[in-house]
Amino acid sequence: GAVLYITIIPPFWQTKTFYAVCIILIIAGVFAFIRWRTRAIEIEKKILEAKVAERTAELAHKNKDITSSIEYAKRIQEAILPRIDHIQKRFHDSFILYKTKDIVSGDFYWFGEKEGKKILAIVDCTGHGVPGAFMSMIGHNLLNQIVIEKGIITPGEILNELNHGVQTALQQGTGGVETTDGMDAAICTIDTETREVEFAGAFRPLIIVS
């Protein structure tokens, strides 16, 4: 019998070569996309790092300014505190333990002399750091006014005047800005001739060690 051979040539998109080219192009495209994305991420990272470095430098500069300002405030606060040697001349065996939590403190000690008597005060103001330091300045000035200017030397009366002065200074109970700030205090009036000690405290005790 007769034999007829027919060869059908498939379209190019069905050839192995086309499949191979497509696979190569896909792999190359994925690789190129990964490289592009990686490069874009690196550029974004460098931009972010530059911004972070800029902000960090700004914060460091501001922090330096703030710290310098607080350090200066510390020198002012220390300047108004009574000198230790001045107190030790009146009380030879005395000492002061004053360790602040922050650069500036809401705690302070005060010393004054009036009518031959020596008045000591230890005051703990509400708040720490800068807010406490503001309160300590108010307390220090009030004690100067009460003892040095008004001549009040009885501890109980000093406490009452201090309480009234703080309420007035902070406008407490006047309809102004409502605050609950205040001070815990221990006040002693000492007569070194008679060796008599008068004490009054607001949430701060007197401890006697014999």
Image: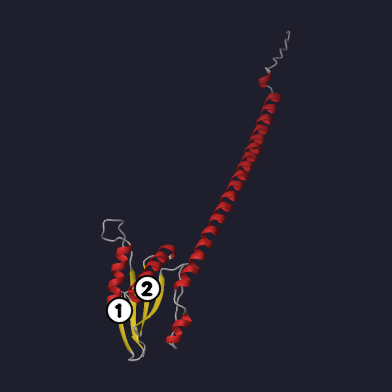
- Identify the image's colour scheme: rainbow, by chain, secondary structure or one colour: secondary structure
Q: In the rendered structure, find residue 144 and report the number of the disc placed on it.
A: 2
Query: Residue drawn at (48%, 65%), measured in percent from left and top?
Result: 73
Say above or below: 87 vs 139: below
Task: Judge from the rendering whether residue 18 lies leftward or rightward of residue 95; answer left or right.
Answer: right
**How many other residues sit within 10 Å of disc 1, few (<14), some (14-19) or many (≥20)?**
many
Query: Residue drawn at (34%, 90%), measured in percent from left and top?
Result: 195
Q: Which residue is mark 1?
A: 155
Question: Residue 103's spot in the image, x, y percent?
Answer: 48, 67
Q: Secondary structure at mark 2?
A: helix
- Judging depth in this view, the residue of 187 and 11 nearest the camera is 187
Say above or below: 170 vs 84: above
Say above or below: 2 vs 10: above
Task: Judge from the rendering whether residue 44 lies leftward or rightward of residue 163; answer left or right.
Answer: right
Question: Residue 62's spot in the image, x, y percent?
Answer: 54, 55
Residue type highlighted by circle 2: Asn
Q: Are marks 2 and 1 in contact (CB under 8 Å)?
A: no
Query: Residue drawn at (28%, 61%), measured in percent from left and top?
Result: 172
Question: Residue 19's spot in the image, x, y percent?
Answer: 67, 26
- Image quarter (top left, top right, bottom left or bottom right) of the N terminus: top right
Answer with the quarter of the image where residue 182 lies: bottom left
- Which residue is farthest top? 2
Question: Residue 72's spot in the image, x, y percent?
Answer: 51, 65
- Judging depth in this view, the residue of 72 and 33 nearest the camera is 72
Residue type highlighted by circle 1: Pro
**How many other residues sit within 10 Å of disc 2, few (<14), some (14-19) or many (≥20)?**
some
Q: Earlier in the sequence, mark 2 or mark 1?
A: 2
Answer with the quarter of the image where residue 133 lies: bottom left
- Judging depth in this view, the residue of 177 and 18 nearest the camera is 177
Q: Secondary structure at mark 1?
A: helix
Q: CA distance from mark 2 to mark 1?
A: 14 Å
